[in-house]
Image (tube, rainbow, N blue to C red):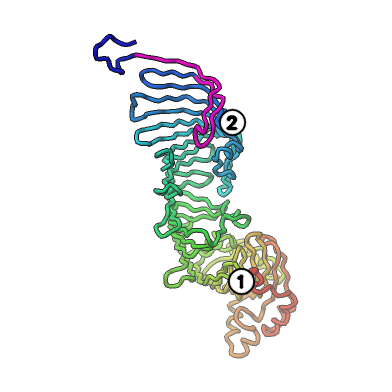
Amino acid sequence: RFPLLRSLKFDDIEYGIKASITDASIAKAAIDRDLSNGAFSLEISRPGVHLQGNARFDDIPISIDGGVFFRPKDGVRARYRVALTLDDQQRRQLGFEYLPDRIRGPIGVDLTYSAFEAGRAEADARLDLHAASLFVEEAGWNKAPDVPGTGRLILDLANEQITRLREIEVKTAGLYGKFGIKLTPDRGRIERVDIERLVIGGDDIAGHVALRPDGGWHVELHGPTLDLTHWLSDSGNDSLSRHSAVDPPLLVDARRGRLILGPRRQVRNVSAQLFREGDNWQAARIDARFVNGHELALRFGSEAEKRGLSFLSDDLGATLSLLDVTNNIVGGRVTITGQVSDTAGKRILRGHIDGENYYLIRAPGLAKALSLTSLNAIGSMLAGSGIPFSTLRGDFAYSEDRLVLENLLAYGGALGVTANGLLELGPQRLDIQGTIVPAYTLNSIIGNVPVLGSLLLGGEGQGLFAANYRATGSTADPQVWLNPLSALTPGFLRRLFQPNFGIPPSVRESLGAE
């Protein structure tokens, strides 16, 4: 219909066209894929063109509802809504197989594509994850099929090229994540990932990951909780904690309200900066507090001493528990110093430990040894308030969950113990030998007698009344052997009986660095 006007304009004409289209096909309709078997209803009117129907896109069933606007509103020139479901094979077929080890199964996609002026466009995809399985093994989390879940992905495009992943959001039981990704100007790689919030398992974090000007990545994380339990437990079985020499440099800045390393192993008020280059961490600066308020401080790889490490804490027991070495120490202060070296493809920390004023409790291996020496009175202290020790000192070497003790000496008024050998922290096994010295204070007085003292005691950590021991097997229930002859001999002769127990392997053998 059009009015009878002398100066008739096109906009004054009312018109409409309706048509049905069958068996429609368009070669390379999008992303180099063909559209076929189209069945559409088409309507053309003054506002624009509207198309609705079903087709197959690269032989995948889809539904389409969209149109072109002759008089754009809000700058939108065209808008299309496409719905489809993609299984694993179809995602591979279209080149959308992102994170195949994290996502499996069918995903429903409801995509709205809006085209603006000057070649700008936006794609808003809403995802139905109900039938899919999701996996984040590092956090000990997964979603089974038939558990409700949704996702959303909003992309900005220029001239049909993605310029930014403005919003990525995932919601399901035990997982919420919201991110944004910025691409480099050439759009060839990621420049920055903003983590608005990520809640998964015991983790609740925010922050960003960005390219560093001099290469590599800078990760900044903050939030109330970060749980590394599963990351650490899996690190010995896969590549989570292993890196390649060609990996880009990584700088991590973290501020956490609570950092969890395992059951009953956590610290709070964590401030950390770590730097990794190649296949190893090169520097670390960590400050934190234990749950009881005591402090710890770690320094590694300073400008003054690239390979040097120092650790200070006013709670020796909490430190050893945090490091999963033992839960049998209470209180005390500790200082650890050392040097890191790379030998035969392994990173080895060799260091010295000094501790003071702590208590030893439970300790099944020592309890067995004390019972064999008939020191039941001292042994009963283990089940009570503990055996007090004034001093701990010795050397150690550590690599890949293997801790080698060298000339470790612990003593107090009631007891002195020396130890040499191997602790395997992963499987919780040990092979340790040394000397048990009851009434250490009395023995020390005898040791101060010139010449006679050294002959009778046999050197520091020995005693006139002492016995050689060896403990092997599980740390929870070790086998303990005691040489009864060594308890009846002066210190300088007691060493003759040590070979009866066998000699623990050298540091290099124990760490597998031959």
Relative to 240, residue 298 above or below = below
Quadrant for the C terminus in the image: bottom right
Q: Which residue is mark 2?
A: 59
State the quadrant of the N terminus. Answer: top left
> Where does the image place residue 304, in percent across and percent down from the top left?
42, 72
Task: Say few, some or many: other residues with alpha carbon within 10 Å of mark 1 (under 14 / 14 to 19 / 20 or more).
Answer: many
Answer above or below: position of 222 versus 50: below
Which image quadrant for residue 173? Answer: top right
Q: Residue at x 45, y 41 (%)?
A: 178
- Front in this rendered view, residue 99 or 338: 99
Which sits earlier in the primary sequence, circle 1 or circle 2? 2
Q: Which residue is mark 1?
A: 405
Q: Residue at x 55, y 40 (%)?
A: 95
Range of magenta residues: 14-40
Q: Nearer the viewer, residue 102 or 161?
A: 161
Element type where label 1 sits in the image:
strand
